[in-house]
Amino acid sequence: MSGPSSEPSALAGAPAPRARAWAQQVLSWLPGSALTAVIALAATFVSTLHGGPQLLYALFFGVAFHYLSQDGKTKPGIEFCSRTLLRFGVGLLGARITATQIVGLGWSTALIVVAGVVTTIGAGLLLARWLGMTRAQGVLSGGSVAICGASAALAISAVLPRDKEGERFTLMVVVTVTVMSTVAMVLYPSVARVLNLPPELAGLFIGGTIHDVAQVVGAGYMLGPATGDIATIVKLFRVAMLALVVVVVSTAFKRAREASHAEGGGKARQPLVPWFLWVFVAMVLLNSLGALGTQVQGALNDVSRGCLVVAIAALGMKTSFRQLASAGWRPFVLILAETLWLAALVLACAWWRR
């Protein structure tokens, strides 16, 4: 009679197949992720040392390493950073916002901001059609101008149908909207001074029109602490609208997105509300309840910004200067027109409230 087998069982002696597959997946991400992180750090160093838009540096530095985007070792990590890490960074943007800030704006200011967001996206749809561009391109460009520049472009692109043309257009939007936001940061405070706008209206104009959060803060505090505070709160209200806009866009493009995922070998059925939006809402709720201390909030903001910089570097690596140039003049005209529309609308409303 034979005794118990001395050989360990396959289940006890080997890691679970799922855990092993996960470990292999993580290892496959490391080379590309490390590369994009180094590029992001270089962009941050140059931005800190010489000034200028950090995201734009990350994009251009990434484009310089385009030849590595198809390398077998680095491609999985680049894909991970340009998609999963991007979505996580967008979700953490909610840590900047509280319900108290939004309520404190007042109904008239809130209505002006909502009107600016809605009409700018609508203008983007109309102009895109007139320029012979797609509906998705109109929504993406309009949303980026109306809400929070590059961050909004990345969030909205995550729920649009996935294709190479879409990624190229997203990068064009990031480049153009960042340049527009930088120009606005310089020009808009002068416009407010020339029109002699009081701090509350100057803050509405600055916060309701400039694309990027950091540039809103810079432009607002050029005009004084009161204007800077109001501009920042108005801008954060625009950022808070990102969640609603992403849900609406996700609903409108659900079938096209599922079809593109199915063609690419992914899951045909996609969730209506993406997971990163739940992270965004959770961050807003926790911050509103005071569960996030000042240090935690600051750390989450830094992590969010870092994720977005790395994601932009990864997106840059997936394209080339030739591909960017092939987009032509139409994206620039589209975003310029949307920027001018938003500025004119908010400025007219501010002037009317004097």
Image: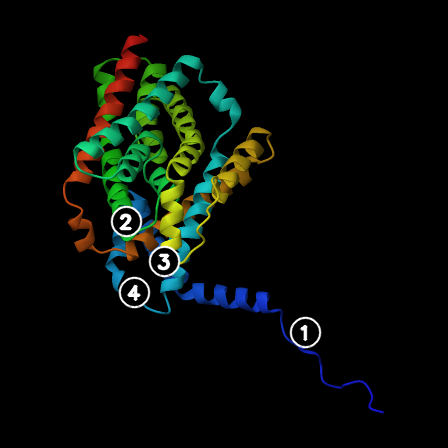
Per the image, the residue denoted by label 1 is 11
Q: Amino acid at mark 2?
A: Tyr
Q: Residue at x 35, y 46 (%)?
A: 161
Q: Residues within 10 Å of mark 4 (few under 14, many from 20)?
A: some
Structural distance between the alpha carbons of marks 3 and 1: 38 Å
Reply above or below: 202 against 262. above
State which quadrant residue 336 falls in: top left
Per the image, the residue denoted by label 2 is 57
Q: Amino acid at mark 1?
A: Leu
Q: Which mark is residue 36?
A: 3
Structural distance between the alpha carbons of marks 2 and 3: 13 Å
Kind of element beneath mark 4: helix
User: Quick check: 25 left or right of 46?
Assistant: right
Per the image, the residue denoted by label 4 is 68
Q: Quadrant of the N terminus?
A: bottom right
Measured as percent of width and height from the top left, residue 53 is found at 29, 42
User: Quick check: 165 left or right of 261?
Assistant: left
Q: Quadrant of the C terminus?
A: top left
Structural distance between the alpha carbons of marks 1 and 2: 50 Å
Q: Amino acid at mark 3?
A: Thr
Q: Nearer the viewer, mark 3 or mark 4?
A: 4
User: Quick check: 192 left or right of 90?
Assistant: left
Tell me which colouring the rendered structure shows. Answer: rainbow
Query: Which of marks 2 and 1 precedes in the sequence?
Result: 1
Measured as percent of width and height from the top left, residue 296 is found at 55, 40
Reply above or below: 140 against 229. below
Q: Amino acid at mark 4?
A: Leu
Q: Residues within 10 Å of mark 1 (few under 14, many from 20)?
A: few
